[in-house]
Image: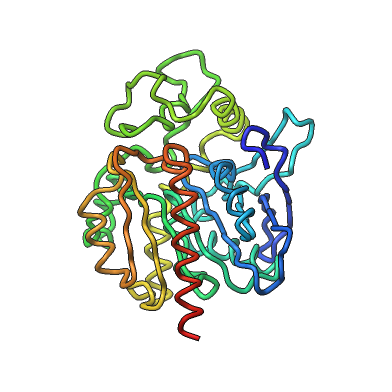
Amino acid sequence: MNPSDASSFNHRTEKLSTGRTYHFVDQIPTDYKQGRTPTLLCVHGFPDCWYGWRYQIKPWVQRGFRVVTPDIRVRTILSYTRQGYGGTDKPKDAIDYSTKRLCADLTAILDLLSIKKAVLIGHDWGHSLPPFGISHIICAIYATFTAVHTSEKLLKDSAKFKLSGLLRGTTLYGGGRVKCDLSSPSPTQRFKISQLYKGPEVLSKVRVPDSDIVLNAEELGFYTRLFEHQGMNGPLNYYRTALYRHEEELAAHLPPNVRPDLPVLFIYGTKDTTTTAALISKAHRFIPRLQDLALEERGHWVMLEARDVITDKVIQWLEDLIEAQKARL
């Protein structure tokens, strides 16, 4: 499990009961006991894949946890290893990226692995997936929230969104108009993946020096190859699902609050412009057992910018929960 060698992890590609094919990394500790060893289900955000957890997987496994890190609608191809690991199905239509469908896939992965309960660890968009698979989740850890926007046209046309302060006016991802060509020679057309992996000022300053990037050259090459191969339509579909997600939640009569017995840890960087004080305050209103931990001078990519802190704090929090549970028995 070498973070510098993607092929050193245990890759699997499986057909799920939902009918979709998924690629995921599945690392099992040496003393694994089915039904007793805790499982960490790590869900990446935008634009990312299982590789985003590369620095945490090994130390978490060494502490006795099974770690499962799926590619969510991302087709990872490790061409430089001379072996493609198949990859997760990457549908074209935005509806296939809705919360309900992604939750069904994650639940199907756990069922495939005969895992009845898991710890959900989500980064960025990974925080939005639990509502439809909550029965499998014993606790949740979120590394940054992200504000979700939809197109201006949808906001104007649909009265349903007038009540949501979260969905405010940007057309950046609306209507499928955005197309990112990583190979285009034109600087006005070429999507620069490095811009999304900047340090603390990731979204407040787009034109920052490349020296501020949180990836090394090898890591940047991995992501560039990945998105050159698969394009950005799939990842951007996350942002085109606002109406679908809203209708799914209404149809399921989901309550606004997280169930009161669910422990939740939220870790964020104080320089992350996607995480505001107002957003954190709102979260406490809807998540009764929420604890939040601020990492000073860190940005959006906390798994990279504060890799050791994230690794240790997650383990410490989980071990404290386990000890507290034992004390109640």
Question: Considering only vertical position in the picture, is 284 above or below 5?
Answer: below
Residue 90: x and y in percent read 61, 46
Q: Is residue 268 left or right of residue 314?
A: left
Q: Viewed as shown, does residue 300 lie left or right of 229?
A: left
In this rendered view, identify the residue nearer to me: 40 or 205.
40
State the scheme by which the image is colored: rainbow
Occupied quadrant, residue 207 = top left
Number of numbered discs on residues: 0
In the rendered image, the vertical position of residue 196 relative to residue 104, given as above or below? above
Q: Position of residue 104 (x, y in %)?
A: 57, 65
> Which x, y percent locates residue 69?
60, 52
Q: Nearer the viewer, residue 184 or 216?
A: 216
Q: Is residue 76 above or below residue 245?
A: above
Q: Identify the residue at image location x=28%, y=39%.
A: 271
**Res. 306 image quadrant:** top left
What residue occupies the far bottom of the structure in this picture?
329
Q: Tell me which residue sits at (62%, 37%) in the image.
A: 3
In this view, which residue lies farthest toward the right?
A: 82
Residue 297 percent location from the top left of the image: 30, 37
| Quarter containing the N terminus | top right
Which residue is at a point 29% across and 42% down the rendered structure image?
A: 296
In this rendered view, identify the residue nearer to me: 94 or 45: 45
Displayed quadrant of residue 251: bottom left
